[in-house]
Image (spheres, rainbow, N blue to C red):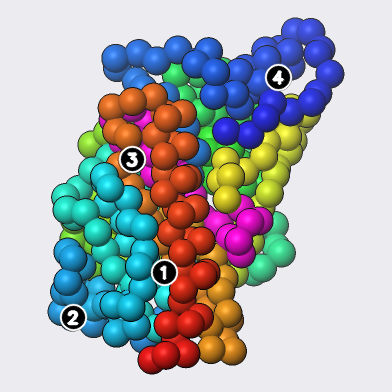
């Protein structure tokens, strides 16, 4: 998790926002967990070109993820637990590992939430998008001690872009629910849109039951989340949002750093983190790599790392597994492409 923002220590309602933000932004165990609601910390593309294949490759590669021939010469450090999947723009799949059984995905859920919002309300790159007035529920939920939230003020007008940033960068669950109500009238109707979209993308092993990932009944697989990431990264606005290093909550004076600790290193340009005790650590990542003289987008998904432990431990494991995969791909992929 990012370090606590350095802000003054005011009194009153604003102070409660700032104090709570400092606590949430530290993986110190100070945020209480309950049996009913485990903390979901959002600790959290591919351009269509030759990545497909209808046959499964060796090692458990799922439908639609035929392994690229050069992948067989790579020695990737796949996670020893959970599941993972990686693909490269214009080259194909580098493999899928782990049993592709649907598992809780925590705040990785918000990739679909953002994708649906941007499909329903398209934004140009660098644009602010539509305006949204925060309701009282979203403001009240800003104070939750059992989930990650971002401060919003009831009656205040926010841009669509800023709300998407507050949802994706610090992983504000309350903001995800606000956006869902704004788009569809209620969260149930928005969840139905999410599931229809998943079906349209061929995500056969995915079920969404909420918009934030708080619900452990929202389940998916690495292969399915890779399909979604490939589709989402085609949108320039989405790419900008998930590459945002930090965001300030208007009117609250709090700045949040992106929960993706890999962002900005080894060519990483996104994507989304998520962790909870049931889900373990989860990370969808996107990086750029030059291969045979061409700039390629590489996308990976790592799910269900250290499930059953703390969100902090799971998140650390997901980041470490992803970092190892990225390092190996950057070291080996160019040479493998030259040999093929």
Q: Judge by depth and name the residue closer to the eye, 282 or 163.
A: 282
Q: Judge by depth and name the residue closer to the eye, 77 or 297.
A: 77
Looking at marks 2 and 3 on the same chain, the residue that comes earlier in the sequence is marked by: 2
The secondary element bearing badge 1 is classed as helix
Q: Are marks 1 and 4 in contact (CB under 8 Å)?
A: no
Looking at the rendered image, the quarter that the C terminus falls into is bottom left
Which label belongs to residue 54?
2
The secondary element bearing badge 4 is classed as helix
User: Looking at the image, is 98 positioned above or below residue 261?
Assistant: below
Name which residue lies at 51% across and 61% down: 327
Q: Which residue bears the numbered disc 4?
A: 18
Looking at marks 1 and 4 on the same chain, the residue that comes earlier in the sequence is marked by: 4
Query: Mark 1: few, some, or many residues within 10 Å (few <14, many ≥20)?
Result: many
User: Looking at the image, is 297 positioned above or below residue 191?
Assistant: below
Chain part drawn in magenta: 263-283
Looking at marks 1 and 3 on the same chain, the residue that comes earlier in the sequence is marked by: 1
Kindly report the distance in space between the C-alpha atoms of the residues bearing marks 1 and 4. Answer: 36 Å
Residue 289 at x, y = what percent? 56, 74
Residue 275 painted magenta? yes
Looking at marks 2 and 4 on the same chain, the residue that comes earlier in the sequence is marked by: 4
Looking at marks 2 and 1 on the same chain, the residue that comes earlier in the sequence is marked by: 2
Please name which of the two marks, 3 or 4, marks the residue nearer to the observer: 3
Q: Judge by depth and name the residue closer to the eye, 84 or 276.
A: 84
Name which residue lies at 62% across and 47% down: 165
Q: Main secondary structure of the magenta part?
A: strand
Please name which of the two marks, 1 or 3, marks the residue nearer to the observer: 3
Residue 287 at x, y = what percent? 54, 65
Kindly report the distance in space between the C-alpha atoms of the residues bearing marks 2 and 4. Answer: 51 Å
- Judge from the rendering whether residue 277 lies leftward or rightward of residue 266; answer left or right: left
Q: Which residue bears the numbered disc 3?
A: 305
């Amino acid at each position: 998790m990012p370090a606590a923002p350095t802000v003054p220590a005011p009194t009153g309602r604003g102070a409660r926002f700032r104090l709570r933000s400092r606590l949430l932004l530290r993986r110190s165990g100070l945020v209480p967990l309950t049996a009913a609601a485990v903390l979901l910390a959002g600790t959290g593309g591919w351009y269509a070109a030759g990545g497909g294949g209808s046959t499964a490759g060796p090692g458990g590669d799922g439908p639609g993820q035929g392994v690229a021939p050069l992948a067989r010469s790579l020695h990737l450090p796949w996670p020893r637990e959970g599941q993972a999947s990686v693909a490269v723009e214009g080259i194909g799949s580098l493999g899928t590992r782990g049993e592709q059984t649907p598992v809780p995905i925590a705040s990785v859920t918000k990739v679909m939430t953002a994708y649906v919002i941007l499909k329903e309300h398209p934004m140009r790159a660098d644009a602010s998008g539509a305006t949204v007035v925060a309701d009282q529920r979203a403001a009240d939920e800003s104070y939750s001690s059992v989930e990650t939230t971002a401060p919003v003020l009831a009656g205040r007008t926010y841009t669509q872009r800023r709300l998407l940033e507050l949802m994706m960068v610090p992983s504000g669950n309350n903001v995800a629910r606000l956006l869902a109500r704004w788009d569809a009238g209620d969260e149930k109707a928005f969840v139905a849109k999410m599931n229809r979209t998943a079906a349209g993308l061929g995500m056969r092993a995915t079920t969404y039951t909420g918009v934030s990932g708080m619900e452990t009944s929202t389940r998916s697989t690495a292969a399915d989340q890779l399909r979604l990431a490939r589709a989402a990264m085609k949108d320039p606005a989405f790419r900008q949002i998930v590459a945002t290093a930090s965001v300030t909550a208007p009117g609250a004076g709090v700045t949040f750093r992106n929960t993706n600790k890999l962002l900005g290193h080894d060519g990483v340009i996104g994507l989304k983190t998520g962790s909870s005790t049931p889900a373990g650590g989860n990370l969808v990542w996107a990086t750029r790599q030059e291969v045979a003289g061409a700039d390629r987008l590489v996308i990976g998904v790592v799910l269900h790392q250290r499930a059953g432990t703390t969100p902090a431990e799971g998140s650390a494991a997901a980041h470490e597994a992803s970092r190892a995969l990225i390092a190996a791909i950057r070291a080996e992929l160019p040479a493998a492409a030259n040999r093929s």
